Amino acid sequence: MDAVIPSRSHDPGGHATGPEATQLVFGIMSAGYSDAVVRQLVRSLQPAAVVVHHDFERYPGFRLDMPNAYLVPDPLRTGWGNWGFVSGIVRLLEYALDSFEFDYLQLLSPTCLPIRPVESLRRHLAENPADAHVDLVGLDDDPEALLEFAYRAFLPGGSLRQRVMLRVMALAQGRDPTRETRAGLCIARPSGDGFASRARFRAGLTLARAARAGLLGHTPFDASFRPYVSSTWFCANRTACRHVIDKARDPGLVAHYRNGRLIDEIFFASIIGNSGLRVGALNHLINDFDTHGHPRTLKLDDLDRLAASRRFFARKFRDDPADPARQRALAWAGVAASGEAGEPERATGVPSTPQSPLVESAE
């Protein structure tokens, strides 16, 4: 394990004292996308240290060779929103806390890119202090979100109850629901406004509320631990990272979500939402979603919206380093058009004895 550098830029409460003292580390969950786009993202974040959790079991040919990139040792087998993916994020947070001096860690996917210089994020975090930056949606307060996420939040993965809830959700939302992007999430607004449509929605909501109340099986949620959803790509300070790690070991949460389906948007949001920590706005603009609920890839036509958002990152860019939208975003972030940035003298926030960032295989 790399040596720990004592954090000198924190006050006794664990918060940065000014823009020049705010140290950033970035974390990337890598699996399935080309190593070229990961390298491009890592370069765009120089000179900050970037911690990468890569699933070598599924994608063994991955290569990373930048001086500011550090691979998480003993990475886990991951999947799309499953327990392995959640556990991989927790492993990344643990490694970053043990090995790096930082004030904030920003989590990213390989399809994210900065759309403003990283230095502007540093200033923003110093001037708008919070323990975590993420947009939360409380399922107890949003009927449409409750219907959308009930099958993931409250019911066992692969169970008959979950399949029934999925079917009821589809009927309640109607044939062509409007898919809205709220808090970086896809939440369907039911189609139609007639009596039959409203009746289907009420029936679906009744079943979702029964699941929330534990009437369809035990859940970890009650009046003191409420369900939230959010984008997975949160930013957190050391206090929030430690809280997430500690709560992720809770036997009740582990038992409920170990076999869950698409749980990452619920798991971390519920931990942060019930933490009592200070929560600021999400640093990402997440692109809107297609009719199947998948985020669309960003194109040149979307860039005016990105610029107007005043966010610091955007998702989802194409898996192609030469994509024109990627190149424009990199230019906004102050990175050369190729995605190449100058080699830093030393990456900020690095461990005192860093591992080699060059890995060619899973061996």
Image (cartoon, rainbow, N blue to C red):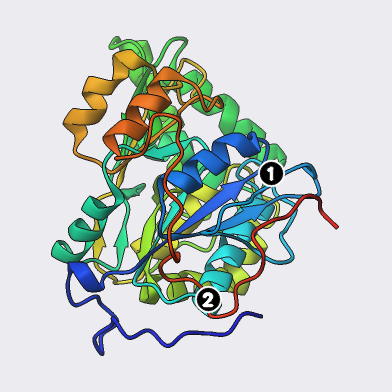
Occupied quadrant, residue 301: top left
Q: Is residue 154 left or right of residue 1?
A: left
Q: Residue at x 38, y 17 (%)?
A: 299
Estimate how packed mark 1 is, as few (under 14), some (14 to 19) or many (20 or more) residues with alpha carbons within 10 Å.
some
| Pointer 1 residue | 79
| Pointer 2 residue | 351
Residue 220 visible here: yes
Estimate how packed mark 2 is, as few (under 14), some (14 to 19) or many (20 or more) residues with alpha carbons within 10 Å.
many
Up-down: is 129 above or below 161? below
CA–CA distance in space, label 2 to label 1: 29 Å
Give the position of the N terminus as an image quadrant.
bottom right
Discs 2/1, front: 2
| Closer-to-camera residue (236/329) | 329
Task: Tell which circle, 2 or 1, labels the residue nearer the N-terminal end.
Answer: 1
Badge 1 marks a residue whose secondary structure is loop
Q: Which mark is residue 332?
A: none
Occupied quadrant, residue 258: bottom right
Question: In the image, what residue type sits under mark 1?
Answer: Gly
Q: Is residue 168 left or right of residue 62?
A: left
- Are discs 2 and 1 less than 8 Å apart at CB? no
Q: Position of residue 81 (x, y in %)?
A: 60, 44
| Closer-to-camera residue (355/211) | 355
